[in-house]
Amino acid sequence: MSIDNLEFDVTEMGQIRIAPEVIEIIAGLAATEVRGIAGMSGSVAGGIAELLGRKNLGKGVKVEVGEKQCAVDLSVVMEFGMKIQEVAAEVQKNVKRAIENMTGLEVVEVNVHVLGVTFKNEEKEEEAVTQPHRLR
């Protein structure tokens, strides 16, 4: 196994390598599919990349990858009014299922860190009220 890429000796033809970034993307997408997740919370560098127009699909995801197992840490923002424990449990199931189905790795941990709550309807209403029309 390489530190940079996950390697599998699957066939006599050679190796299959899965970069940790691929697992981060799988986990991030699986997490955001769950109802109640408003988004992922990432680093300052990830925020800057998004401002520059590059979508960071692995935002808010950290993975540790071994030869046959991996562990995932997710930093999420939830929608207000949702039951945090239920949403987090559904995120854990969805992420575990997606990674195991797509990579064949055993997922031993999916840790969900709730870093914020968003009020979607209120934000949209405030934007509509505070943004004056610039053109007439």
Image (cartoon, helix red, strand yellow):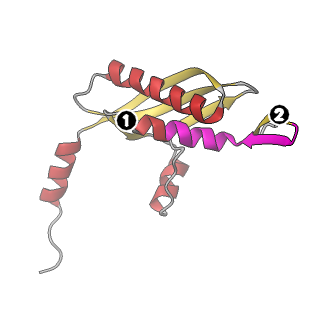
Nearest to the observer: residue 131 or residue 68: 68
Give how far across and how far down residue 133 sits, in percent.
15, 71
Location of residue 2 by image quarter:
top right
Q: Identify the magenta region.
A: 12-28
> In percent of the image, x 21 and y 47: which residue is there?
123
Secondary structure of the residue carrying tag 2 is strand
Location of residue 51 by image quarter:
bottom left
* Left or right: 54, with 114 as reference point: right
Residue furthest toward the front? 12
Q: What residue is disc 2 on?
A: 9
Crowding at dot 2, Cα within 10 Å, few <14 / some 14-19 / many 20+, comes out as: few
Looking at the picture, does residue 50 appear above or below residue 120?
Answer: below
Q: Quadrant of the N terminus?
A: top right
Q: Quadrant of the C terminus?
A: bottom left
Q: Tell me the distance, in whole angstroms, between the alpha carbons under discs 1 and 2.
A: 38 Å
Disc nearer the start of the sequence (1/2):
2
The dot on residue 77 is: 1
Give how far across and how far down residue 13 sits, in percent.
86, 42
